Amino acid sequence: MQQIKINLFGIGCRVIKGEFEEGIWKRFHATARAIKTPLDEAIFDTSFYESLKMEEYKSLADLGNVFQYNGLMNDAKSLIEIRINNRKKRNIRTNELFNESVLFPVFRTTVCKVENAPLLPNSLLAVEKEMGTITSYKFETGNFSLDKLSFAITTLNINKPGDCVLLTKIEYDGMVLTATPSDTLVTERYCYLG
């Protein structure tokens, strides 16, 4: 059996959209005022969730009740590395994957477009960008073939100039690969409130 490891390096992005009941929204604002931080900044602070004391909201990830996407961005610094038995076999630049303009595609991709509806009252859209090892996938197979890899690409319209295009999922031979936690440094955060 071959041991396969696929590493995603470069610029990653997490996009979270949540909509909340009036009472919860007021509690969010009251908690943000208590820690003397505007709500659009407080949601990125762990002390906000400690002060909030709501079991269902322990981190930023818990706010994504409408949608939540996380993945590797289409950026010049982003790279997909494929290792077989701990030896580097192939590097794929994201522009090869995202911007294929060839007669016969080299990679199997599926594209999902998510249109961002206007923010309703009591809602938020949070974006967090990071740099480093976005994620890794490990699996075993008898004979690895690049043709059996399928890349899921998600295009999000997030109210800022330019869409956010992410590699959100990788499958191998019809099996969704499980991602390991990232090792990154956050480079940018912002939030829109409804």
Image (spheres, grey):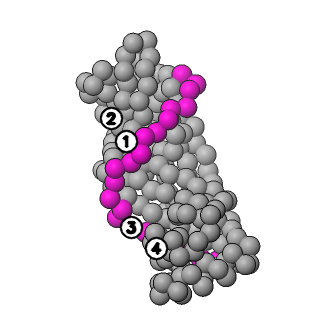
Q: Which mark is residue 188?
A: 3
Find residue 152 and report its image quarter.
top right
The front one of 144 and 162 is: 144
Give the amino acid at mark 1.
Leu
Question: Looking at the picture, which amino acid does disc 4 mark?
Answer: Ser
Residue 57 lies left or right of residue 137; in this view the side is right
| N-terminal-most mark, 4 or 3 | 4
Please name the amino acid that badge 2 sits on. Glu
- Badge 4 crowding class, 10 Å Cα cut-off, few under 14, some 14 to 19, many 20 or more, is some
Query: Going from the N terminus, do you reach mark 3 or mark 2 first?
Result: 2
Give me the disc on residue 81.
2
Tag 4's secondary structure?
helix
The vertical placement of 119 against 155, above or below, is: below
Point out the tag, 4 or 1, that comes first from the N-terminus.
Answer: 1
The question of residue 146 being in magenta is answered with no
Give the alpha-carbon distance from disc 1 to disc 2, as whole Å: 6 Å
Q: Secondary structure at mark 3?
A: strand
Check disc 3: other Cα within 10 Å, few if <14, some if 14-19, many if 20+.
Answer: few
The CA distance from mark 4 to mark 1 is: 30 Å
Across and down, in percent, residue 46 comes to 46, 69
Residue identified by numbered label 1: 8
What stretch of residues is rendered in magenta?
A: 173-194
Q: Is label 1 in a helix, a strand or a loop?
A: strand
- The local crowd at label 1, few if under 14, some if 14 to 19, many if 20 or more residues have their Cα within 10 Å, is many
**Of the residues shown, which amino acid type is indicated by label 3?**
Glu
Which image quarter holds the N terminus? Answer: top left
Q: Which mark is residue 171?
A: none
User: Callout 2: few (<14), some (14-19), or many (20+) C-alpha neighbours within 10 Å?
Assistant: some
Q: Where does label 4 land, which residue? A: 47
